[in-house]
Image: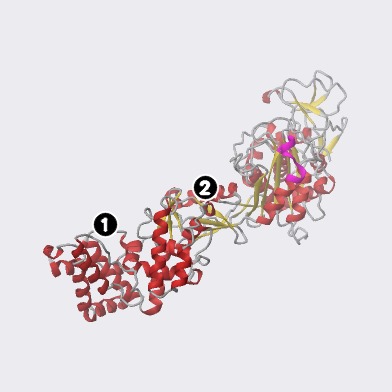
Amino acid sequence: MSHAARKRRQRRSKGGAARVLLVLFAVVFVGLGVSAIGGVGYVVSVADSVDLNEMDQVDPGAPSVVYAKDGTKLGYLPGPVLREKVRTSEMTDLVRNATVAVEDRRFYEHSGVDVEGIFRAATRNISEGGNAEGASTLEMQLIRNLWTKDTTSSLKRKIREAKLAQQLEDRHPGREGKTWVLTTYLNTAPYGTYGGQAIKGVEAAARVYFKTTAKKLTLPQAAMIAGLPQAPTDYNPYVNPEGALRRRNDVIGRMAAQGYISTSEALEAQEKPLGVKKGGSYYTNKRERFFLNYVRNILVQKYGKKRVAQGGLKVYTTLDLKKQDLARKAMSDKLNPKAGDPSAAIVTLDPATGDIEASTGSTQFGSNQYDLATQGRRQPGSTYKTIVLTTALEQGISPSTSYPAPGSIPIPPQYGTGVVKNFAGESSKGGSMDLKTATLKSVNTVFFQLGLDVGMKNVTKTARAMGITSKLQSLPSESLGSASVSPMEIARVYATIANGGMRVTPRAITKVEFENGDVKRPQPVRRTRAIPQDVASEVNRILQADIKGGTAASADFGCPAGGKTGTTDGPSDVWLAGFTPRLATAVWVGYPTSRKTIVSTTQAGGNIQGASVSAPIWKEYMAGAHGDFCGQFQGLVPFKGTKGRPGGKSGSAGTTTTDQYGNTVDQYGNTVDGTGDAGGTGTGQTYDTSPTP
């Protein structure tokens, strides 16, 4: 025990002993015939068994509230208690005075225990043969609400509360102490239930019963709320409006009798109807419900279901509401679901921190609770080629390395049957194409060969390093985007390129404040070197060229940016993933519950691909999202790699043979000179993942 605490105890034991004994002895008479159970000795022994300094305060509970980046409230997370703590200045004097009038009329005169009130209650109880009147002060009720949680009707409880109330008064003396007690009581008192949740505190009561705040309560409203704590169920205005009205008018009458209002004000207020409104929607209405669910899942992972359900957290997030609105507008401007157009999702990360600044889909939460932005797993198409290219550059292969670029190539027998074809039938007619050009044209046949050359297990390793967490099988088809990944993962991959090869962990929460004042940061900024800086710089330059004159050219909004389109078979999924120095954004378009062919009635028209559907959405969104910044990429360094294609010189195909059609093919079955018939398409899958500019 501290020195100050010992001094407080000494002062109480010396100067206040007679007062304590008198008060506690008087408490005995609140019950009937209680002197027989031990009298003064019993009172003193019970009183000596408690000490406020040795007791922990009980958490009164509150819903957890989640805020956007700018401090705007997104909504409350479900919890057992509805409560908002407010300052004294945020409560009208009407509700403060009404509470004193009905609960503790001598509140400003006594010292935690109302001796006069106790004798008055004891006399009435004895004369009427029952428990007709209580004698609990606001301090005693506050002790019950925040320290003991004892709601029994025992004499022991009253003695304990009286002793602790006096100690509370010693801890908060004078007029300022009274203000603290009343404000704290009004922030923790029970005011009934709504939808199975306990209403605690005058602010929550004002919002639930009248759709207003504690500061704006009128006299009739304040009086009704002040009358609830004694019997919240009996006076519930939704269940027993007649009883609630009688209780309200009784409170108003007491306020007039004690001089808080005039008689005319009281009469006028008593004539008013209850005027209650069901305002519980204040606590159930939410913005960005998909993101709120995402945040709640993170909290549960960090602190457990029980702690999150308990509530009382203030959660500050990274979400930029302006970007959310821009994203939804861009999707609605380009797609019309009512006319059969597909859905879309947009995710934006800050490449430097991983902050999730936008994460939204075009579907409404009520119609579909599946979060397309974070939970959707779809084939990324040619956006995955960036990972294959990165793997090659990591191995020192120069982007000027040439590969055979026929319109189609057979799939090696060990991987199945069929052919790999380019989306628009691009073919070099027996010629070759360097990796940079193949990226800008998104040539499937080149990237299929490249994936085999660098090794698909290495591609998977690079994908993991850059931020892909979904299941990968290291199959050659994944070089063309046959894996299933989320827009969040693709945005993370492109953030790694924008960030000079540093992978960031997506971050939704900047900090969490607990009701006791503790501040936690469950998602600190995490940056990890994923790929060499020179490799990231070179990929960055190539993707900038793609958005200037490659397949992603229709996404160019006038500021330095890089990007890559993606289109899968059907097409059933179309993408645009790209970045600026400060934003990395992935746009996906498709049907959430099927892989049917995308049909658009809007600007996209007939030839559906990433360039015609996702790119215009990305462009419109990024044109607004980039804000005033339109600067150049910093920190780009020269690429160190100089190697050519594995198995041969730059531009060669390595070991070659002749197939049954007379074509010269390399060790992977790729056509080199194109002199013979390309052969049939076989029965395998055709990988249509390469949109044209």
Magenta segment includes 340? yes
Relative to 499, 247 lies left or right = left
Q: Which residue is mark 2?
A: 297
Pick whichever, 629 or 505, lies toward us: 629
Q: In this view of the protein, can residue 236 be seen by the observer?
A: no
Tell me the amino acid under the disc marked 1. Thr
Pick whichever, 264 or 453, lies toward us: 264
Tell me the amino acid under the disc marked 2. Asn
Relative to 638, 298 lies left or right = left
Magenta segment includes 63? no
Q: Residue 605 in the image: x percent, y percent? A: 82, 36
Numbered disc in front, either 1 or 2: 1
What color scheme is it?
secondary structure
Q: Quadrant of residue 67?
A: bottom right
Of labels 1 and 2, earlier in sequence is 1
Q: Is residue 689 above or below residue 271?
A: above
Pick whichever, 314 or 144, lies toward us: 144
Split into 4 quadrants, where in the image is the N terminus?
bottom left
Q: Which residue is mark 1?
A: 152
Pick whichever, 585 or 108, lies toward us: 108
- Residues at marks 1 and 2, CA–CA distance in whole angstroms: 39 Å
Q: Residue at x 84, y 20 (%)?
A: 662
> Which numbered dot is residue 230?
none
Which element type, helix, strand or loop, lies under badge 2? helix
Point out the stretch of residues depicted in magenta: 332-342
Split into 4 quadrants, where in the image is the C terminus?
top right
Crowd band around label 1 with a 10 angstrom C-alpha radius: few (<14), some (14–19), many (20+): few
Q: Residue 138 in the image: x percent, y percent? A: 34, 68
Q: In this view of the protein, can residue 531 be seen by the observer?
A: yes
Relative to 223, 290 lies left or right = right
Q: Residue 546 in the image: x percent, y percent? A: 81, 46
Q: Residue 62 in the image: x percent, y percent? A: 45, 57
